[in-house]
Structures are given as C-alpha cells and as structure tokens.
C-alpha cells in the first residue's frame, strides 16, 4: 500500500529521486526496481508497480473494443505509458512528454494512493486540494456508506 506525500526536485536531465518509502514496492522482475508511468486523471501522472499494472491493463482491455470512447481512451492511455527503471541511486528519468502532460517543472509531489502513486506538479496539487479539500467529509460519505 502506498501512503504519504513527498516533494522532490527534478534535475536538469529530468531525473527525480523516488521516495525511499516507495522504492521497495516498485519491484520488477529480478532485482530491478521499476514501474509503469502514464497520464493519470485530474492533472497528475499515475505510477503503477508491475503487479498492479496487470490489473489496470485487464480493466482497460475489458472494455476497449466495445465502444468508441473506450478505444479512444485506451489509445491515449497506452501511447503515453512508459516503463521506467529506478537507477542504483534511487532516481528515475522522467520523460519530458510525461512531465509536460502533468505540468511538472523543476519539482514534483509524490502522493501515495493505495495501489498507485500519483505524481503532481505542486501547483496543480494545490489547486486540486483547494477545490476538493473543503469537501473531504462530503466525499467520505460516498466512500464510507452505512
């Protein structure tokens, strides 16, 4: 389970340190640490560990041929997906097209959201939080039903 939030700088080459709390959960085949990064929702990127990525792919596959909307979503979703490997120093090279898709500049905010990590521009996160933060209890009613 991914929880917590951490802000990290992005260097001039586009590399960012992955929070230590998340590193062990991004375990790929063998000893490699890796994850799948793609355009998320609400202006962020989604980062999925390999075992969760299979579940996500299955959900998209289930609907992608049956409707024009689902096919269009699948095309955009997979076209921008990148398999990213964490280097020995705990950094990952975040491709420019992903950074641009989320409006990420010289720093990013990692937010743990159960089975995935979301990567936000701190400014986008602040705007999202300003819009939804005051509705926390209202949103909880939709999640924790009696």
Image (spheres, helix red, strand yellow):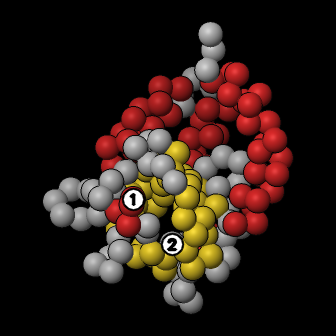
In the picture, residue 139 is in which quadrant? Answer: top right
Considering only vertical position in the picture, is 26 above or below 116?
below
Task: Find residue 112 and report its horizontal and vertical position in percent.
Answer: 51, 51
Q: Is residue 33 visible?
A: yes
Residue with the mark numbered 2: 94
Residue with the mark numbered 1: 22
Considering only vertical position in the picture, is 26 above or below 122?
above
Q: Earlier in the sequence, mark 2 or mark 1?
A: 1
The furthest residue to the left? 30
Q: Residue at x 77, y 51 (%)?
A: 128
Q: Residue at x 39, y 35 (%)?
A: 55
Task: Find residue 3 and report its horizontal and vertical position in percent.
Answer: 48, 49
Measure how far apart labels 2 and 1 are at the Cα level: 16 Å
CA neighbours of label 1 inside 10 A, class few (<14), some (14 to 19), many (20+): some
Q: Do the residues under discs 2 and 1 have CB atoms within 8 angstroms?
A: no
Answer with left or right where residue 60 lies relative to residue 126: left
In the picture, residue 141 is in which quadrant? Answer: top right
Relative to the observer, which residue lies in front, 129 or 69? 129
Relative to the observer, which residue lies in front, 139 or 13? 139
Answer with left or right where residue 102 lies relative to residue 118: right
Q: Secondary structure at mark 2?
A: loop
């Amino acid at each position: 389970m991914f929880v917590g939030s951490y802000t990290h700088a992005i260097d001039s080459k586009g590399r960012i340190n992955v929070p230590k709390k998340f590193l062990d959960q991004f375990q790929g085949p063998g000893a490699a640490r890796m994850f799948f990064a793609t355009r998320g929702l609400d202006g962020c990127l989604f980062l999925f560990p390999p075992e969760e990525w299979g579940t996500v792919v299955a959900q998209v596959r289930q609907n992608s041929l049956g409707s024009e909307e689902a096919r269009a979503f699948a095309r955009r979703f997979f076209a921008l997906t990148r398999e990213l490997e964490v280097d020995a120093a705990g950094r990952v090279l975040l491709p420019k097209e992903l950074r641009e898709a989320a409006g990420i500049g010289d720093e990013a905010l990692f937010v743990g959201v159960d089975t995935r990590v979301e990567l936000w521009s701190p400014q986008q996160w602040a705007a999202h939080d300003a819009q939804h933060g005051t509705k926390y209890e209202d949103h909880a009613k939709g999640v924790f039903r009696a």
